[in-house]
Image (cartoon, rainbow, N blue to C red):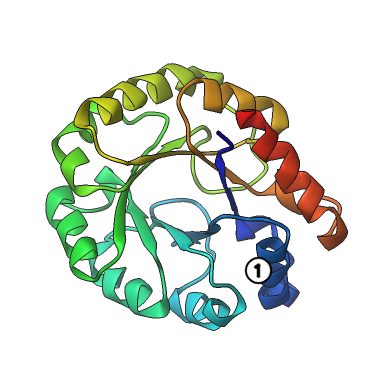
């Protein structure tokens, strides 16, 4: 089964961001991945809920919003109201992960939880009953264009076993250094959704459909 492809707009042309979102939608993206960074939790600044709201009319696809901000709780409602369909948070981004995920669900948004390369799988075991997505980072968060960390493949396999044991339909998403080669490794390790920035946006809009198709072929 072909994986879900969630292009990261971090790699898009920010001068024409609405058009870029529409272009990846038309090219076959399943989700639109939005990386939110605060310059505190991760060493970079990106966008806020106002930009998410402005982009919302440009695609009907689910907005897959990854919150790399701390403290995260004060901003959940703003991103939910802006049109996020999935809000993923890090266990380290607030004192009460369970409460944070409950809050997201209360807004009618799918809660997700994120594992950094240095975060153990055990950190998410107590909250798997609350989430619809687990995101395994295969780079340290903060910047696009980093190299894939193969050390995270066993973590994906461990998360896959945990998800399967729940009997629930939880996406296992991977983000960081994903290209057609590493995509196959991720799918083999149990991933069902792939975030890709450079691998989707390289070559400009005329290449987006072929780039997405190359990633989807990892599941065939």
Where residue 196 appears, as percent x and y from the top left, is 63, 45
Residue 30: image quadrant is bottom right
Residue sitting at 78 percent across and 54 percent down? 208
Horizontal and vertical percent for residue 8? 60, 54
In terms of image quadrants, where is residue 169? top left
Left or right for 191, reference 8: left
How far across and how far down the image is residue 68, in percent? 41, 54
Vertical relation: 123 (above or below) 86? above
Which quarter of the figure is the N terminus placed in? top right
- The residue located at (61%, 78%) in the rendering is 58
| Residue 191 or residue 67, whichever sits in front | 191
Q: Is residue 133 left or right of residue 147?
A: left
Mark 1: secondary structure:
helix
Vertical side of 90 occupied by 65: above or below: below
Residue 112 shown left or right of residue 173 in the figure? left
Is residue 120 visible in the rendered image? The answer is no
Circle 1 packing at 10 Å, graded few (<14), some (14-19), many (20+), is: many
User: In this figure, which residue is indicated by the disc labeled 1?
Assistant: 21
Residue drawn 21% across and 62% down? 105
């Amino acid at each position: 089964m072909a994986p879900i492809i969630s292009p990261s707009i971090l790699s898009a042309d920010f001068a024409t961001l609405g058009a870029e979102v529409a272009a990846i939608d038309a090219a076959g993206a399943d989700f639109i991945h939005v990386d939110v960074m605060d310059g505190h939790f991760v060493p970079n600044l990106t966008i806020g809920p106002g930009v998410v709201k402005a982009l919302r009319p440009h695609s009907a696809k689910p907005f897959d919003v990854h919150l790399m901000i701390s403290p995260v709780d004060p901003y959940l409602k703003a991103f939910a109201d802006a049109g996020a369909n999935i809000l993923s948070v890090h266990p380290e981004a607030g004192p009460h992960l369970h409460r944070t995920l409950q809050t997201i669900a209360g807004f009618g948004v799918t809660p997700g939880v994120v594992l950094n390369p240095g975060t153990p799988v055990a950190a998410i075991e107590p909250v798997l009953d609350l989430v619809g997505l687990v995101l395994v980072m295969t780079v340290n968060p903060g910047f696009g264009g980093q190299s894939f960390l193969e050390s995270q493949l066993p973590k994906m396999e461990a998360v896959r076993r945990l998800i399967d044991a729940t009997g629930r339909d939880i996406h296992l998403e991977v983000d960081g250094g994903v290209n057609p080669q590493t995509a196959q490794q991720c799918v083999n390790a149990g991933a069902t959704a792939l975030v890709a920035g450079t691998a989707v946006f390289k070559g400009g809009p005329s290449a987006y459909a072929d780039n997405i198709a190359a990633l989807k072929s990892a599941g065939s």
